[in-house]
Image (cartoon, rainbow, N blue to C red):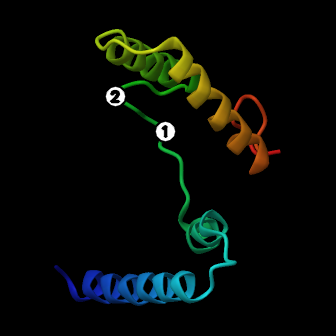
Amino acid sequence: MTTTCINEHSKQEIVNERFATALLSHNDRDFWSEVKRIRSHKTCQSNVVDKSSTPECTADFFADKYEDLYSRVSYSVDDVKKISDELNILVEKHGFDDKCAFS
């Protein structure tokens, strides 16, 4: 590891420690808001996912993988509906629309 990497790693460890301490000592703090605040400047989007370079191809790639994954196991339709409803409520609560785009 280079000196620059070590310094960045040390900085990140300090940030992580302060984050954990702040959350543990202040129950009223919102976990995801804090994560978003810390990581907001580090967010980037990959241009290529498994050789797919357009958003449509990437979406199709993940749709195919999830369809394959979820068709391999049995599940309760009611359980999946409940999970889906809970996730939709959380998505809306945090300001995202039905396409998971931040509004």
User: In the image, residue 44 lies at what x, y percent?
Assistant: 54, 54
Instruction: Name the residue beneath numbered marker 2.
Output: 50
Whole-percent x, y for residue 48 in the image: 43, 34
Q: Report the front residue among 70 and 48.
A: 70
- Residue bearing mark 1: 47
On the rendered structure, is 62 left or right of 37?
Answer: left
* Quadrant of residue 68 within the rendered picture: top left
Q: At 43% from the left edge and 81% from the top edge, which residue is drawn?
A: 16
Depicted 96 relative to depicted 78: above or below: below
- Work out whether 39 lies above or below 4: above
Q: Residue at x 77, y 48 (%)?
A: 93
Q: Which mark is residue 64?
A: none
Location of the C terminus by quadrant is top right
In this rendered view, identify the residue nearer to me: 20 or 74.
Answer: 74
Q: Secondary structure at mark 2?
A: loop
Find the residue positioned furthest to the right.
103
Indicate the quadrant containing the N terminus: top left, top right, bottom left or bottom right.
Answer: bottom left
Residue 81 at what x, y percent from top left?
Answer: 60, 20
Report the residue at 47% width, 82% height from top. Answer: 20
Left or right position of 3 against 28: left
| Amino acid carrying mark 2 in the image | Asp
Residue type of the residue flagged with mark 1: Asn
Left or right of 68 on screen, residue 85: right
Count neighbours of disc 1 (C-alpha within 10 A) and say few if under 14, some if 14 to 19, many if 20 or more: few
Q: Nearer the viewer, residue 62 or 5?
A: 62
The secondary structure type at the circle numbered 1 is loop
Q: Give percent across and percent down for residue 3.
A: 23, 89
